[in-house]
Image (cartoon, helix red, strand yellow):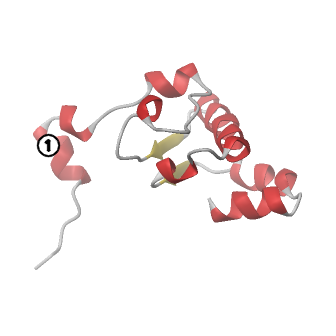
Amino acid sequence: MDELIAAIDGNRVDWWRARYRRATALLLDDIHLLAGKDRTQEELFNLFNQLLDADRQLVFTAPAHPNTLQGWKSGSRRASREVSSPRSASPTARCAATPWSGS
């Protein structure tokens, strides 16, 4: 997200778009930190929709559903439909997503 913010500030959004549209997978943690940053959210949702159309893997994390976050726009109905919670996952899926300490 730092690269996107720097690209917006430096008027280099085209470079950022070209770089991330080639991604085969995208993981963004703590998207709630983008609350109130409309331009950044708009760019992410455009990227999200393009990667989803290309059958790429996407994971965004937040402490709550994007529709419940203050200052967060739900710019894509597809994004809202694709949301899931670890609480609703099977025990096997939750274990697969839980970091292992290896001790």
Residue drawn at 56 percent across, 45 percent down: 35
Q: Residue furthest bottom?
A: 103
Which quarter shows the N terminus? bottom right
Q: Nearer the viewer, residue 90 or 9?
A: 9
Q: Quadrant of residue 86?
A: top left
Instruction: Say left or right for 1 vs 63.
Output: right
Q: Position of residue 30 (x, y in %)?
A: 45, 54
User: Number of callouts in the render?
Assistant: 1
**Does 1 sit above or below residue 64?**
below
Q: Nearer the viewer, residue 72 or 99?
A: 72
Q: Residues within 10 Å of mark 1 (few under 14, many from 20)?
A: few
Q: Position of residue 96 (x, y in %)?
A: 21, 51
Instruction: Say left or right for 36 vs 84.
Output: right
Q: Quadrant of residue 87?
A: top left
Instruction: Say left or right for 71 vs 88.
Output: right
Residue drawn at 87 percent across, 58 percent down: 12
Amino acid on which disc 1 is placed: Thr
Residue drawn at 48 percent across, 48 percent down: 32
Residue drawn at 65 percent across, 64 percent down: 2
Residue that numbered label 1 is attached to: 92
**Does 4 sit above or below residue 79?**
below
Q: Position of residue 69 (x, y in %)?
A: 45, 37
Q: Position of residue 6 (x, y in %)?
A: 76, 64
Is residue 89 in view from this perspective? no
Which type of secondary structure does the marked residue at label 1 adopt?
helix
**Does 78 sit above or below residue 27?**
above
Which quarter shows the C terminus? bottom left
